[in-house]
Image (cartoon, rainbow, N blue to C red):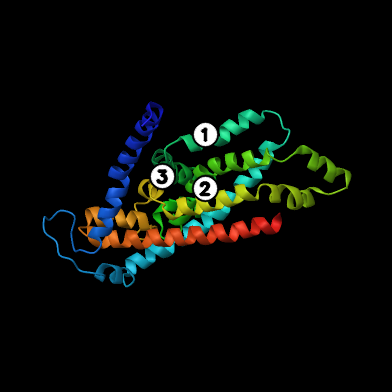
Amino acid sequence: MRSSMKTYYWMVVPAVAIFFVFHTYPVLMGIFYSFTNWNGLSPDYDFVGLRNYLNVFRDGNVLDAYGFTIKFALLTTVIVNTISLVVAMGLNARIRLKNFFRGVYFLPNVLSMLIIGFIFNYLFSNVFPDAFERMGLDSLAFNILGKENTAWIGVVIVTVWQATAFNIMLYLAGLQTIPSDLYEASSLDGAGKWREFWSITFPMIAPFFTINMVLAMKNFLMVFDQIVALTGGGPGKATMSISYLIYTDGFQGGSFAYQSANAVVYFIIIVFISVIQLKFLQRREMDLG
């Protein structure tokens, strides 16, 4: 083996080994334990076949968590991508202090979601209710996270505020790949801004739109930090997401094997949704092209 090749192997093999030990092996063990009744602590366990998988589809708490998570992911994906695209187009225009605004909009992306969540938790619990009360808006002077029918709104607001920054950067990168002479030609032809957007801008950034939609949907389906920092799955179980349910019930509730089966099922669902999204959006890219 040539010495230069050995160097490349030394660069690649350690990373693969670390990935296998800390990622692949735990996943394989999780799949193995999903066919048992192990509680996560006992040295003994029995194989139960597919019983855990069958019970997942009969568990009301699990089905409620699936309902909340999927509705949250759909709504947040649409809102984040809509706001991101609009802001990115504004930041791509010839405006003053453009670099300053880009820095401001990207700032939430470098902050920890847990820190942001705890800050907003304090704002929702104390600052906003007091402010609305002083303004005489008593109907709004309450903790939005403290009621079952409004807690999800708080989670959506914080998630959108933090997640929009990354999508703005991707859309901005896509907008900067569009040749300016296309806009000059459309302007000479008398095309309006709306026509310009649908005929030039959106088709040219279609691959970036696909990436943003798929990544956003995947990330929001795995919502966890926001729930930990804002609601803890409550009030009651109103904002219980699948990831948080797997964590709390699996590690704290003694249902490790059962929640491992739930995690496997959820992994398959996320892969299925991502593949469907990719196929649909890539077909749309071809139609626009």
- Report which quarter residue 7 is drawn in: top left
Is residue 240 at all visible to an observer of this figure?
no
Residue 56 or residue 281, whichever sits in front: 281
Q: Earlier in the sequence, mark 1 or mark 3?
A: 1
Label 1 or label 3, whichever lies nearer to me, is 1
Q: Report crowding for label 2: few under 14, some 14 to 19, many 20 or more residues within 10 A (C-alpha).
A: many
Which element is circle 2 on?
helix
The answer to whether 183 appears left or right of 284 in the picture is: right
Residue at horizontal 49 percent and vertical 52 percent from the top: 156
Q: Position of residue 178 (x, y in %)?
A: 71, 41
Which element is circle 1 on?
helix
With respect to residue 128, does 240 lie above or below? below
What amino acid type is highlighted by mark number 3? Asn
Q: Report crowding for label 3: few under 14, some 14 to 19, many 20 or more residues within 10 A (C-alpha).
A: many
Residue at horizontal 33 percent and vertical 60 percent from the top: 264
The answer to whether 11 appears left or right of 252 in the picture is: right
Residue at horizontal 26 percent and vertical 70 percent from the top: 50
Circle count: 3
Q: Earlier in the sequence, mark 3 or mark 2?
A: 3
Q: Tell me the tag on residue 121.
A: 3
Q: Position of residue 10 (x, y in %)?
A: 34, 31
Asked if disc 3 and disc 2 are in contact, CB closer than 8 Å, the reply is: no
Q: Residue furthest front?
A: 1
